[in-house]
Image: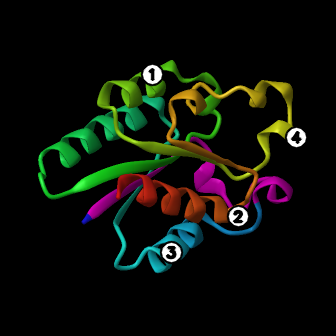
Amino acid sequence: MIKLLVINGPNLNLLGLRETSHYGTLTLKDIEANLEVRLKNKAELSFFQSNHEGAIVDRIQAAYQEFKDSEETKGGIVINPGAFGHTSIAIRDALLATAIKFVEIHISNVYAREEFRHKSLLSDIASGVIVGCGPLGYELAAEALLAKLN
């Protein structure tokens, strides 16, 4: 069985409320429920959201242990780092250190927004990047990651 961890960074707990013109009206719980339905019988899903950089680093390191400790299980991460994608060397280093395959996702088209959002510190080490597809991006990222892990 493949395990997928879906990590969401800062302010993504406010989906459905914040800047709906960029992010839509679905809540994070709605997005998670849609993923559960789409990936039923394909992957074991777990979800994590934090507004704290160190907590995300800790969760990536814990995932490494979870995936490593099970010989019959493969694992990967779908990560929407939010603003940390543009600023966090610590999250980048955790992903590099653990060598877990991951797909980066951004709900909005970051390239159609402020200049500072155009650079991601994760994209060049990601297995794939999904940008600007709205909440569907999570499903696309998960399916792409499953294909890479199989």
Sequence-first disc among 3 and 4 = 3
Indicate which disc residue 90 carries.
1
Q: Taking 96 as reference, is 2 above or below it?
A: below
Q: Nearer the viewer, mark 2 or mark 4?
A: 4
Disc 4 marks a residue whose amino acid type is: Ala
Earlier in the chain: of badge 1 and badge 3, it is 3
Query: Label 3: which residue?
Result: 33
Q: Is residue 17 magenta?
A: yes
Q: Residue 5 in the image: x percent, y percent? A: 38, 54
Callout count = 4
Front position among marks 3 and 4: 4
Residue 33 appears at what percent x and percent y? Answer: 50, 75
Please, is residue 90 above or below residue 7 in the view? Answer: above
Q: Please identify, in this view, whether the residue under mark 1 or under mark 2 is nearer the observer.
A: 1
Q: Residue at x 35, y 68 (%)?
A: 43
Q: Residue 112, labelled with which disc?
A: 4
